[in-house]
Image: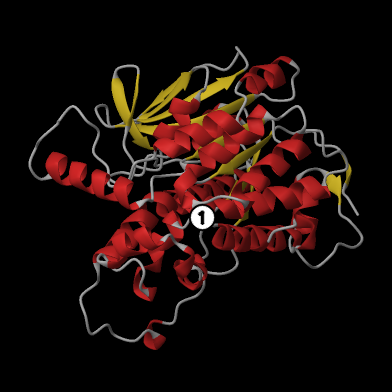
Amino acid sequence: MQCEGHQEAVTGLVLSGGGARAAYQAGVLAAVSELLPDAARNPFPVIVGTSAGAINAVGLACGALHFGEAVERIRSVWQNLHCDQVFRSDWAGLMLQAGRFLRRGLLGMRRDKPLSLLDSSPLRGMIEREMDFTGIAAAIRQRSLRAVAVTAFGYDSGHAVTFYQGWGSIDPWFRHRRVGMPTRLGADHLLASAAIPLVFPPVRLQHEYYGDGAVRQVAPISPALHLGATRILVVGVTSNPPRDDAAVPASVQPPSLARIAGHLLNSTFIDNLESDIELLERLNHIGRILPPGREKRRLGLRNVDVLVINPSQPLEPIAARHRKSLPLSLRAFLRGPGATQVGGAGVLSYLLFEPGYCNELMELGYRDAMSRRDELCAFLGAQAPVSMPETADSLGAG
Protein backbone atom coordinates (compact mmCIF):
# COMPACT_ATOMS: atom_id res chain seq x y z
CA MET A 1 0.00 0.00 0.00
CA GLN A 2 1.29 3.46 -0.88
CA CYS A 3 1.20 6.89 0.59
CA GLU A 4 -1.51 9.23 -0.56
CA GLY A 5 -1.32 12.96 -0.94
CA HIS A 6 1.14 15.43 -2.34
CA GLN A 7 4.14 17.41 -1.25
CA GLU A 8 3.90 21.19 -0.89
CA ALA A 9 7.22 22.28 0.61
CA VAL A 10 10.56 22.23 -1.18
CA THR A 11 12.06 18.96 -0.01
CA GLY A 12 15.77 18.39 -0.30
CA LEU A 13 17.60 15.08 -0.33
CA VAL A 14 21.14 14.91 1.09
CA LEU A 15 23.16 11.77 0.31
CA SER A 16 26.41 11.54 2.23
CA GLY A 17 29.63 9.92 1.04
CA GLY A 18 31.13 6.61 2.00
CA GLY A 19 32.33 4.51 -0.92
CA ALA A 20 30.59 1.13 -1.06
CA ARG A 21 28.53 2.10 1.98
CA ALA A 22 26.40 4.24 -0.36
CA ALA A 23 24.65 1.04 -1.47
CA TYR A 24 22.58 1.55 1.70
CA GLN A 25 21.13 4.70 0.11
CA ALA A 26 19.82 2.71 -2.85
CA GLY A 27 17.76 0.58 -0.46
CA VAL A 28 16.30 3.66 1.25
CA LEU A 29 15.43 5.18 -2.12
CA ALA A 30 13.73 1.95 -3.20
CA ALA A 31 11.51 2.18 -0.13
CA VAL A 32 10.71 5.84 -0.81
CA SER A 33 9.75 4.99 -4.39
CA GLU A 34 7.47 2.21 -3.18
CA LEU A 35 5.75 4.51 -0.70
CA LEU A 36 4.97 7.25 -3.19
CA PRO A 37 1.46 7.36 -4.69
CA ASP A 38 3.00 8.36 -8.02
CA ALA A 39 6.38 6.73 -8.53
CA ALA A 40 7.01 8.81 -11.64
CA ARG A 41 6.96 12.10 -9.74
CA ASN A 42 10.23 13.25 -8.22
CA PRO A 43 9.62 14.03 -4.50
CA PHE A 44 12.97 15.84 -4.13
CA PRO A 45 13.23 19.12 -6.08
CA VAL A 46 16.67 19.63 -4.52
CA ILE A 47 19.18 16.76 -4.58
CA VAL A 48 22.64 17.08 -3.04
CA GLY A 49 25.35 14.44 -2.82
CA THR A 50 28.95 14.00 -1.79
CA SER A 51 31.47 11.33 -2.80
CA ALA A 52 29.65 8.08 -3.67
CA GLY A 53 26.47 9.86 -2.57
CA ALA A 54 27.10 12.33 -5.38
CA ILE A 55 26.91 9.50 -7.91
CA ASN A 56 23.58 8.36 -6.47
CA ALA A 57 22.35 11.96 -6.39
CA VAL A 58 23.20 12.70 -10.01
CA GLY A 59 21.78 9.34 -11.05
CA LEU A 60 18.47 10.43 -9.54
CA ALA A 61 18.67 13.86 -11.17
CA CYS A 62 19.41 12.37 -14.60
CA GLY A 63 16.15 10.41 -14.35
CA ALA A 64 14.09 12.95 -12.40
CA LEU A 65 11.37 12.91 -15.08
CA HIS A 66 10.55 9.40 -13.82
CA PHE A 67 11.72 8.96 -10.25
CA GLY A 68 10.81 5.27 -9.92
CA GLU A 69 12.76 4.27 -13.02
CA ALA A 70 15.77 6.29 -11.87
CA VAL A 71 15.74 4.51 -8.50
CA GLU A 72 15.49 1.15 -10.24
CA ARG A 73 18.53 1.94 -12.41
CA ILE A 74 20.56 2.95 -9.35
CA ARG A 75 19.47 -0.16 -7.48
CA SER A 76 20.34 -2.37 -10.45
CA VAL A 77 23.85 -0.92 -10.69
CA TRP A 78 24.54 -1.52 -6.99
CA GLN A 79 22.99 -4.98 -7.12
CA ASN A 80 25.40 -6.14 -9.83
CA LEU A 81 28.45 -4.07 -8.91
CA HIS A 82 31.96 -5.52 -8.74
CA CYS A 83 35.24 -3.95 -7.67
CA ASP A 84 36.65 -4.04 -11.20
CA GLN A 85 33.86 -1.68 -12.29
CA VAL A 86 35.11 0.94 -9.81
CA PHE A 87 38.89 0.48 -9.83
CA ARG A 88 41.42 -1.87 -11.37
CA SER A 89 41.58 -4.91 -9.10
CA ASP A 90 43.60 -7.27 -11.32
CA TRP A 91 47.16 -8.18 -10.36
CA ALA A 92 48.72 -6.14 -13.16
CA GLY A 93 46.63 -3.06 -12.40
CA LEU A 94 47.27 -3.21 -8.65
CA MET A 95 51.02 -3.71 -8.99
CA LEU A 96 51.33 -1.02 -11.65
CA GLN A 97 49.47 1.50 -9.51
CA ALA A 98 51.43 0.53 -6.39
CA GLY A 99 54.67 1.13 -8.28
CA ARG A 100 53.43 4.51 -9.46
CA PHE A 101 52.42 5.40 -5.91
CA LEU A 102 55.88 4.56 -4.55
CA ARG A 103 57.72 6.38 -7.32
CA ARG A 104 55.51 9.44 -7.06
CA GLY A 105 54.94 9.53 -3.30
CA LEU A 106 58.28 8.40 -1.90
CA LEU A 107 60.80 9.11 -4.64
CA GLY A 108 59.24 12.26 -6.05
CA MET A 109 59.20 10.97 -9.63
CA ARG A 110 56.53 11.86 -12.22
CA ARG A 111 55.18 14.81 -10.28
CA ASP A 112 52.87 15.57 -13.20
CA LYS A 113 50.79 12.47 -12.44
CA PRO A 114 48.05 12.39 -9.76
CA LEU A 115 48.91 10.35 -6.66
CA SER A 116 46.69 7.39 -5.67
CA LEU A 117 46.84 3.82 -4.44
CA LEU A 118 44.12 2.62 -6.83
CA ASP A 119 43.30 3.32 -10.46
CA SER A 120 39.67 4.49 -10.69
CA SER A 121 39.52 4.70 -14.48
CA PRO A 122 36.86 1.92 -14.65
CA LEU A 123 34.53 4.15 -12.62
CA ARG A 124 34.62 6.79 -15.35
CA GLY A 125 33.54 4.23 -17.91
CA MET A 126 30.66 3.04 -15.73
CA ILE A 127 29.43 6.60 -15.10
CA GLU A 128 29.52 7.45 -18.78
CA ARG A 129 27.64 4.24 -19.66
CA GLU A 130 24.97 4.48 -16.98
CA MET A 131 24.17 8.21 -16.89
CA ASP A 132 22.54 10.49 -19.43
CA PHE A 133 23.50 13.94 -18.16
CA THR A 134 21.11 15.61 -20.62
CA GLY A 135 18.30 14.34 -18.41
CA ILE A 136 19.23 16.93 -15.77
CA ALA A 137 18.55 19.88 -18.08
CA ALA A 138 15.34 18.24 -19.32
CA ALA A 139 14.07 17.76 -15.74
CA ILE A 140 14.93 21.36 -14.86
CA ARG A 141 13.10 22.68 -17.94
CA GLN A 142 9.98 20.70 -17.01
CA ARG A 143 10.18 21.78 -13.36
CA SER A 144 10.63 18.23 -12.12
CA LEU A 145 13.91 19.35 -10.58
CA ARG A 146 14.99 22.62 -9.02
CA ALA A 147 18.69 21.83 -8.60
CA VAL A 148 21.21 19.04 -8.18
CA ALA A 149 24.62 19.55 -6.60
CA VAL A 150 27.81 17.67 -5.83
CA THR A 151 30.63 18.85 -3.58
CA ALA A 152 34.36 18.44 -4.16
CA PHE A 153 37.41 19.66 -2.26
CA GLY A 154 39.91 21.98 -3.94
CA TYR A 155 43.49 21.01 -3.12
CA ASP A 156 44.87 24.47 -3.97
CA SER A 157 42.15 26.71 -2.52
CA GLY A 158 41.25 24.49 0.44
CA HIS A 159 37.57 25.21 -0.32
CA ALA A 160 34.64 22.82 -0.36
CA VAL A 161 33.16 23.73 -3.74
CA THR A 162 29.57 22.76 -4.46
CA PHE A 163 29.02 22.45 -8.21
CA TYR A 164 25.33 22.79 -8.95
CA GLN A 165 23.04 22.74 -11.96
CA GLY A 166 19.61 24.24 -11.52
CA TRP A 167 17.25 27.12 -12.09
CA GLY A 168 18.86 30.30 -13.34
CA SER A 169 17.48 32.21 -10.37
CA ILE A 170 19.76 30.37 -7.91
CA ASP A 171 22.67 32.63 -7.03
CA PRO A 172 26.18 31.37 -6.22
CA TRP A 173 27.25 31.62 -2.59
CA PHE A 174 30.51 32.42 -0.87
CA ARG A 175 31.11 31.44 2.74
CA HIS A 176 34.24 30.68 4.75
CA ARG A 177 35.85 27.84 2.78
CA ARG A 178 32.47 27.01 1.22
CA VAL A 179 31.59 28.05 -2.32
CA GLY A 180 28.61 27.36 -4.58
CA MET A 181 29.42 27.36 -8.29
CA PRO A 182 26.83 26.96 -11.09
CA THR A 183 27.91 24.63 -13.89
CA ARG A 184 26.76 21.88 -16.22
CA LEU A 185 27.52 18.67 -14.35
CA GLY A 186 29.44 15.83 -15.97
CA ALA A 187 31.48 12.74 -15.20
CA ASP A 188 34.51 14.74 -14.05
CA HIS A 189 32.51 16.37 -11.25
CA LEU A 190 31.43 12.97 -9.93
CA LEU A 191 34.91 11.50 -10.17
CA ALA A 192 36.31 14.51 -8.32
CA SER A 193 33.69 14.33 -5.57
CA ALA A 194 34.35 10.60 -5.10
CA ALA A 195 38.17 10.79 -5.16
CA ILE A 196 39.00 9.58 -1.63
CA PRO A 197 42.39 11.15 -0.75
CA LEU A 198 45.37 8.88 -1.53
CA VAL A 199 43.00 6.04 -2.50
CA PHE A 200 41.63 7.45 -5.78
CA PRO A 201 43.37 10.06 -7.97
CA PRO A 202 42.31 13.72 -7.76
CA VAL A 203 40.59 15.17 -10.82
CA ARG A 204 41.38 18.45 -12.52
CA LEU A 205 38.43 20.79 -13.06
CA GLN A 206 39.29 24.03 -14.80
CA HIS A 207 42.51 25.23 -13.10
CA GLU A 208 42.52 23.17 -9.90
CA TYR A 209 42.70 19.56 -8.75
CA TYR A 210 39.78 18.34 -6.68
CA GLY A 211 39.27 15.41 -4.34
CA ASP A 212 36.55 13.89 -2.19
CA GLY A 213 33.98 16.48 -1.21
CA ALA A 214 33.69 15.16 2.34
CA VAL A 215 37.15 16.60 3.11
CA ARG A 216 36.64 19.87 5.02
CA GLN A 217 32.92 19.94 4.22
CA VAL A 218 32.02 21.49 7.54
CA ALA A 219 28.35 22.07 6.64
CA PRO A 220 27.09 19.18 4.46
CA ILE A 221 23.44 20.26 4.73
CA SER A 222 24.11 23.89 3.82
CA PRO A 223 24.14 23.43 0.00
CA ALA A 224 20.59 22.07 0.05
CA LEU A 225 19.44 25.16 1.95
CA HIS A 226 21.25 27.48 -0.47
CA LEU A 227 19.47 25.73 -3.34
CA GLY A 228 16.06 26.43 -1.83
CA ALA A 229 15.16 23.39 0.26
CA THR A 230 12.89 24.09 3.22
CA ARG A 231 13.01 20.59 4.67
CA ILE A 232 15.59 17.87 4.21
CA LEU A 233 15.81 14.09 4.18
CA VAL A 234 19.35 12.99 5.06
CA VAL A 235 20.44 9.45 4.27
CA GLY A 236 23.62 8.64 6.16
CA VAL A 237 25.90 5.63 5.94
CA THR A 238 26.83 4.92 9.54
CA SER A 239 25.17 3.74 12.72
CA ASN A 240 25.96 5.00 16.19
CA PRO A 241 24.98 2.26 18.62
CA PRO A 242 25.43 2.96 22.32
CA ARG A 243 28.89 1.90 23.44
CA ASP A 244 29.77 0.40 26.77
CA ASP A 245 33.46 1.21 27.17
CA ALA A 246 33.73 -1.23 30.05
CA ALA A 247 32.74 -4.06 27.71
CA VAL A 248 35.41 -3.19 25.11
CA PRO A 249 38.50 -5.35 25.68
CA ALA A 250 41.84 -3.59 25.80
CA SER A 251 43.94 -4.13 22.70
CA VAL A 252 47.21 -5.98 23.20
CA GLN A 253 48.62 -4.79 19.88
CA PRO A 254 49.04 -1.34 18.32
CA PRO A 255 46.35 -0.43 15.77
CA SER A 256 47.00 -1.64 12.25
CA LEU A 257 47.29 0.71 9.29
CA ALA A 258 43.82 -0.36 8.19
CA ARG A 259 42.30 0.45 11.60
CA ILE A 260 43.94 3.88 11.61
CA ALA A 261 42.75 4.50 8.06
CA GLY A 262 39.23 3.39 9.01
CA HIS A 263 39.04 6.02 11.75
CA LEU A 264 40.36 8.66 9.37
CA LEU A 265 37.72 7.73 6.80
CA ASN A 266 34.99 7.86 9.44
CA SER A 267 36.21 11.28 10.50
CA THR A 268 36.10 12.46 6.89
CA PHE A 269 32.74 11.03 5.88
CA ILE A 270 30.70 10.99 9.07
CA ASP A 271 31.67 13.46 11.78
CA ASN A 272 30.91 16.70 9.90
CA LEU A 273 27.47 15.50 8.85
CA GLU A 274 26.52 14.51 12.38
CA SER A 275 27.80 17.84 13.75
CA ASP A 276 25.86 19.79 11.11
CA ILE A 277 22.63 17.94 11.93
CA GLU A 278 23.14 18.65 15.63
CA LEU A 279 23.75 22.35 14.92
CA LEU A 280 20.65 22.60 12.75
CA GLU A 281 18.52 20.98 15.45
CA ARG A 282 19.82 23.51 18.00
CA LEU A 283 19.03 26.41 15.67
CA ASN A 284 15.54 25.00 15.16
CA HIS A 285 15.11 24.87 18.95
CA ILE A 286 16.27 28.48 19.34
CA GLY A 287 13.90 29.56 16.60
CA ARG A 288 10.98 27.84 18.30
CA ILE A 289 11.53 29.45 21.69
CA LEU A 290 12.07 32.98 20.32
CA PRO A 291 8.85 34.96 19.97
CA PRO A 292 8.01 35.94 16.38
CA GLY A 293 9.06 39.48 15.55
CA ARG A 294 11.97 41.69 14.63
CA GLU A 295 14.65 39.79 16.59
CA LYS A 296 13.82 36.50 14.96
CA ARG A 297 13.79 38.08 11.51
CA ARG A 298 17.09 39.85 12.20
CA LEU A 299 18.76 36.58 13.16
CA GLY A 300 17.42 34.95 9.98
CA LEU A 301 16.09 31.96 11.92
CA ARG A 302 13.62 29.71 10.17
CA ASN A 303 12.69 26.17 11.03
CA VAL A 304 14.12 23.48 8.78
CA ASP A 305 12.57 20.07 9.29
CA VAL A 306 15.17 17.32 9.04
CA LEU A 307 14.56 13.59 8.88
CA VAL A 308 17.67 11.42 9.19
CA ILE A 309 17.81 7.76 8.19
CA ASN A 310 20.97 5.93 9.21
CA PRO A 311 21.84 2.23 9.25
CA SER A 312 20.33 0.46 12.24
CA GLN A 313 23.30 -1.91 12.33
CA PRO A 314 27.05 -1.25 12.23
CA LEU A 315 28.41 -1.84 8.73
CA GLU A 316 31.89 -3.06 9.70
CA PRO A 317 30.73 -6.56 10.78
CA ILE A 318 28.73 -6.88 7.55
CA ALA A 319 31.84 -6.01 5.54
CA ALA A 320 33.90 -8.50 7.56
CA ARG A 321 31.43 -11.29 6.72
CA HIS A 322 31.82 -10.59 3.01
CA ARG A 323 35.58 -10.00 2.90
CA LYS A 324 36.20 -13.28 1.06
CA SER A 325 34.13 -12.02 -1.86
CA LEU A 326 36.96 -9.63 -2.75
CA PRO A 327 39.10 -10.67 -5.73
CA LEU A 328 42.10 -12.70 -4.61
CA SER A 329 44.49 -10.05 -5.90
CA LEU A 330 42.79 -7.34 -3.84
CA ARG A 331 42.71 -9.51 -0.73
CA ALA A 332 46.46 -10.02 -1.03
CA PHE A 333 46.95 -6.30 -1.62
CA LEU A 334 44.96 -5.38 1.51
CA ARG A 335 46.21 -8.15 3.78
CA GLY A 336 49.41 -6.36 4.77
CA PRO A 337 47.68 -3.20 6.09
CA GLY A 338 45.23 -5.44 7.98
CA ALA A 339 42.09 -4.55 6.01
CA THR A 340 41.09 -8.19 5.60
CA GLN A 341 41.13 -8.74 9.37
CA VAL A 342 38.08 -8.05 11.54
CA GLY A 343 39.79 -5.04 13.11
CA GLY A 344 40.38 -3.51 9.68
CA ALA A 345 36.83 -3.92 8.42
CA GLY A 346 36.29 -0.17 8.63
CA VAL A 347 38.40 0.34 5.50
CA LEU A 348 36.86 -2.73 3.91
CA SER A 349 33.36 -1.30 4.39
CA TYR A 350 34.30 1.58 2.07
CA LEU A 351 36.02 -0.48 -0.65
CA LEU A 352 34.00 -3.71 -0.82
CA PHE A 353 32.19 -3.07 -4.11
CA GLU A 354 30.85 -6.61 -4.44
CA PRO A 355 27.24 -7.84 -4.87
CA GLY A 356 26.91 -9.77 -1.59
CA TYR A 357 27.92 -6.81 0.57
CA CYS A 358 26.09 -4.18 -1.49
CA ASN A 359 22.89 -6.22 -1.62
CA GLU A 360 22.92 -6.71 2.14
CA LEU A 361 23.33 -2.97 2.62
CA MET A 362 20.45 -2.29 0.23
CA GLU A 363 18.22 -4.70 2.12
CA LEU A 364 19.18 -2.98 5.38
CA GLY A 365 18.39 0.45 3.89
CA TYR A 366 15.03 -0.78 2.65
CA ARG A 367 14.10 -2.27 6.03
CA ASP A 368 15.26 0.80 7.93
CA ALA A 369 13.20 3.11 5.73
CA MET A 370 10.11 0.89 5.91
CA SER A 371 10.41 0.68 9.69
CA ARG A 372 9.92 4.47 9.67
CA ARG A 373 7.31 4.61 6.92
CA ASP A 374 4.90 6.69 9.03
CA GLU A 375 7.58 9.34 9.54
CA LEU A 376 8.58 9.21 5.88
CA CYS A 377 5.03 9.62 4.62
CA ALA A 378 4.37 12.46 7.05
CA PHE A 379 7.62 14.12 6.02
CA LEU A 380 6.69 13.87 2.35
CA GLY A 381 3.31 15.42 3.13
CA ALA A 382 1.38 12.24 2.57
CA GLN A 383 -0.96 9.92 4.42
CA ALA A 384 0.75 6.98 6.10
CA PRO A 385 -0.08 3.50 4.78
CA VAL A 386 -2.30 1.17 6.77
CA SER A 387 0.05 -1.77 6.36
CA MET A 388 3.29 -2.60 4.62
CA PRO A 389 5.25 -5.78 3.97
CA GLU A 390 7.85 -6.47 6.63
CA THR A 391 10.49 -7.98 4.36
CA ALA A 392 12.78 -6.59 1.71
CA ASP A 393 11.60 -9.08 -0.92
CA SER A 394 10.45 -6.34 -3.27
CA LEU A 395 14.05 -5.24 -3.65
CA GLY A 396 14.78 -8.38 -5.58
CA ALA A 397 18.30 -8.34 -4.19
CA GLY A 398 20.32 -11.50 -4.57
Q: Is residue 131 above or below residue 385?
A: above
Q: Which residue is mark 1?
A: 21
Q: How many marks?
A: 1
Which amino acid type is marked by label 1? Arg
Residue 259: where, in percent of width, then height? 31, 67
Disc 1 is placed on an element classified as: helix
Q: Residue at x 35, y 42 (%)?
A: 215
In the orientation shown, which residue stands out farthest toward the top?
Answer: 168
Dot 1 crowding, Cα within 10 Å, few <14, some 14–19, many 20+: many
In the picture, the quarter occupied by the N terminus is bottom right
Q: Quadrant of the C terminus?
A: bottom right
Q: Which percent across, then down, holds residue 149?
A: 53, 29
Specify whether 258 is left or right of 354. left
Query: Measuring 46% from the left and 51% from the top, which residue is drawn there?
Result: 83
Q: Is residue 146 left or right of residue 17?
A: right
Q: How is the image coloured?
A: secondary structure
Residue 331 point in image, percent of width and height: 36, 64
Above or below, comparing residue 117 to residue 47 in the picture = below
Q: Is residue 179 visible?
A: yes
